[in-house]
Image (spheres, rainbow, N blue to C red):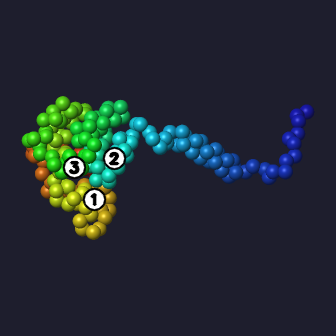
Amino acid sequence: MGSRPQASNQPPRTRNSQAETRNLDLGTELDRLYHGFNAPNSLVDPIELVRPYARGADREIAGFIASALAFGNVTAVMASVKAALALVGLAPAAFVRAFDPDRDGKAFNSFVHRWTRGRDLVALVWVLHQMLERSGSIEELVDRSGQPPASVASALTLLEARGLVNPFGGATFHPTLAAKRLAGVI
């Protein structure tokens, strides 16, 4: 004869309680994975290259540059962001404010990130220069209306509408168009 199950003080498990236990186990496992991979000082996220800048204005410029190059293989992205930030130096906002494409552009000639070349980075820095010249900061340029944009797409459209000029015409890097494509807006 088979053995009888032992009596338990616990109520019998129902289908719902079994599903709840599985969900709890899954939640615990997902939390464990999250905490295992969510290193506060991760070296594989371009934001880690922006955080060392003490001044908000420098973080704003460094962050914009890092986000413009954040596509492709993580190793390549990190190397390219490091190279681009090295070109703008320890005070990116001051560099961008004083930037002159004719005078300073040659330093960018050897820059390459996937299909983005030094000329494209010069165009981006020039657009950033115009943003700072017009409004003092990227945030002020976007927030000029007093109403925060409803989405990233509307912020990018707003920047595009401000008529920022690429010194090389439309054939090179266009940050708002590129960002819209990456965001799936167009």
**Residue 12 place in picture, x, y as percent:** 78, 50
- Identified at 12% across, 45% down, the residue is 100
Residue for point 30% across, 36% down: 82
Give the image quarter of residue 147: bottom left
Q: Mark 2 points at which residue?
A: 53
User: Of label 2 and label 3, which has the lower sequence position?
Assistant: 2
Q: Height in image: 136 above or below 93?
A: below
Pointer 2 local density, CA inside 10 Å: few below 14, some 14–19, many at least 20: some
Q: Earlier in the sequence, mark 1 or mark 3?
A: 3
Say what amino acid the circle numbered 3 marks: Ala
Residue at image mark 1:
139
| Marks 1 and 3 close (CB-CB < 8 Å) | no
Q: Which residue is drawn at 30% across and 62% down?
A: 149
Between tags 2 and 1, which lies in front?
A: 2
Question: The disc labelled 2 sits on which kind of residue?
Answer: Tyr
Mark 2 or 1, nearer chain start:
2
Q: Name the residue under label 3.
A: 94
